[in-house]
């Protein structure tokens, strides 16, 4: 039984080295200071605006994912499958925006 306790303590020590424990303690102290030290009475007034901003952010993110996929798929296929000008254009586009040749 003592071997199991020793090995689990060693595993815990490896998983949580001292610097991580310090980071967690600092983070919890900052969180405690934020929760207890700030005034939160303004939050209900602005919560609808926060919610609208969150919805707009998610919509922009979703649109960028869709448009990025719709642009990346033909460009990737053109680089792999085609020869000639279409491949050159797609390689030039990807090199320009990615900064390296694929």
Image: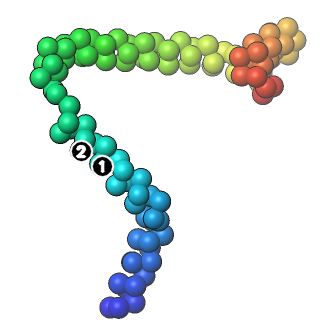
User: Quadrant of the image for the N terminus?
Assistant: bottom left
Q: Marks 1 and 2, how far apart in space?
A: 6 Å
Q: Indicate the position of residue 65 as horizontal and vertical percent values.
A: 50, 19
Residue 28 marker:
1
User: What element does badge 2 sit on?
Assistant: helix
Q: What residue is at 44 percent from the left and 77 percent from the top?
A: 10
**In the image, farthest residue toward the bottom:** 2
The residue shown at (43%, 17%) is: 62
Q: In the displayed image of the protein, which residue is found farthest to the right? A: 84
Front-lying residue, 82 or 30: 30
Rendered image quadrant of residue 41: top left
11 relative to 47 in the view: left or right: right
Q: Decide if residue 17 is on the left or right side of residue 102.
A: left
Q: Quadrant of residue 48?
A: top left
Q: Which mark is residue 3?
A: none
Image coords of residue 90 (percent x, y): 76, 14
At which x and y percent is residue 33?
Answer: 25, 41
Q: Is residue 25 above or below residue 62?
A: below
Q: Is residue 26 left or right of residue 89?
A: left
């Amino acid at each position: 039984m003592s071997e199991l306790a020793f090995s689990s303590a060693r595993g815990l020590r490896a998983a949580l080295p001292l610097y991580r424990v310090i980071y967690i303690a600092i983070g919890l102290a900052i969180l405690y200071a934020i929760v207890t030290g700030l005034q939160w009475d303004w939050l209900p007034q602005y919560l609808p605006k926060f919610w609208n901003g969150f919805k707009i952010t998610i919509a922009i993110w979703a649109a960028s994912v869709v448009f990025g996929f719709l642009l990346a798929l033909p460009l990737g296929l053109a680089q792999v499958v085609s020869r000639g000008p279409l491949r050159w254009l797609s390689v030039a586009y990807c090199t320009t925006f990615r900064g390296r040749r694929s």
